[in-house]
Image (cartoon, grey):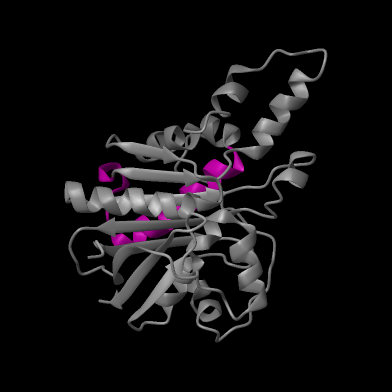
């Protein structure tokens, strides 16, 4: 018997190349409007105090922006939500800068530069911005990071019977690391998941493990985006929700294991 994990999506955030937010991306994901890859625009994180705003990386800004979209749609208080952060890389620009400094004659790394280099830095900025004190998980699973984050978040929802927000984001590395890890642009998805349906519920999802092939977009631009950025592996799920019909979509996860998600509109 296949085990299914059930949760309800109460809010969605989306920012990426040619995708400014969840609402305006509906027409693209449903095929009513052609997709065009335009460089990602990341909003300024107004929630952060001025000093932290100046120090915040693109990863922090991107994750805060998608999370605020999702939380606003769910009509929940960010401070009350357990959170799961899932990044395939971390802050590439900051890592690049530290490597440059270590390769120079002046190897003194500033404390700000160092604390921004750790993988859970974004979770710290999230806590500062929202006042959130519940548990927070920060994951990295290379190209499987979106699937790992979704599994972690939905498991928390089912086991702890509490809402949870998933934030999956990726940002590019500069050269020379870009040649080894060629993520072309910033991309992020945020999902507010809940154990029961509410007035704000968008869809019900049932997740299980499968060995079926992952979904591929017919649109060449969206398919290229899905393959190029690990966080974008979640785009087929958003398309299924935007299409507003019951269906099952298979998302990439591990090499021989993928995630089957039954989507039902509420």
* Residue 138 among those drawn in magenta: no
Q: What percent of the width, then of the height, locates residue 135?
A: 29, 36
What residue range appears in magenta? 57-81
Question: Quarter of the image containing the N terminus?
Answer: bottom left
- Most extreme residue toward the right is 105
* Residue 59, quarter of the rendered image: top right
Question: Is there any visible trace of residue 131 in the rendered image?
Answer: no
Residue at 49%, 49% (x, y): give it: 145
Residue at 27%, 37% (x, y): give it: 134
Q: Compared with residue 130, is residue 118 higher up or lower down, i.e. above or below?
A: above
* Residue 70 among those drawn in magenta: yes
Residue toward you, 84 or 28: 84
Q: Compared with residue 45, is residue 205 higher up or lower down, i.e. above or below?
A: below
Overall secondary structure of the magenta section: helix
Residue toward you, 253 or 128: 253
- Most extreme residue toward the bottom is 32
Give the number of marks.
Answer: 0
């Amino acid at each position: 018997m296949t085990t299914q994990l059930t949760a309800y999506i109460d809010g969605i955030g989306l920012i990426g190349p040619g995708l400014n937010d969840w609402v305006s991306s509906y027409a693209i994901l449903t095929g009513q409007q052609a997709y065009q890859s335009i460089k990602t625009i990341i909003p300024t994180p107004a929630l952060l105090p001025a000093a932290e705003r100046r120090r915040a990386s693109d990863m922090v800004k991107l994750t805060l922006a998608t999370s605020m979209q999702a939380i606003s749609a769910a009509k929940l208080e960010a401070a009350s939500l357990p959170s799961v952060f899932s990044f395939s890389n971390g802050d590439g620009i900051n890592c690049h800068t530290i490597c440059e400094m270590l390769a120079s004659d002046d190897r003194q790394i500033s404390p700000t530069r160092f604390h921004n280099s750790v993988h859970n830095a974004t979770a710290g900025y999230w806590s500062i911005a929202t006042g959130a004190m519940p548990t927070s998980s920060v994951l990295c699973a290379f190209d499987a990071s979106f699937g790992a984050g979704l599994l972690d978040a939905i498991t928390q929802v089912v086991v702890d019977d509490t809402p949870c927000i998933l934030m999956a984001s990726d940002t590019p590395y500069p050269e020379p690391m870009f040649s080894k890890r060629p993520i072309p642009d910033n991309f992020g998805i945020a999902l507010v998941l809940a154990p029961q349906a509410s007035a704000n519920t968008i869809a019900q999802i049932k997740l299980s493990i499968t060995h079926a092939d992952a979904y591929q977009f017919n649109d060449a631009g969206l398919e290229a985006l899905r393959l190029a950025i690990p966080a974008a592996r979640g785009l087929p799920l958003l398309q299924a929700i935007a299409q507003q019909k019951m269906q099952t979509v298979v998302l990439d996860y591990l090499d021989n294991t993928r995630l089957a998600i039954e989507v039902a509109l509420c």
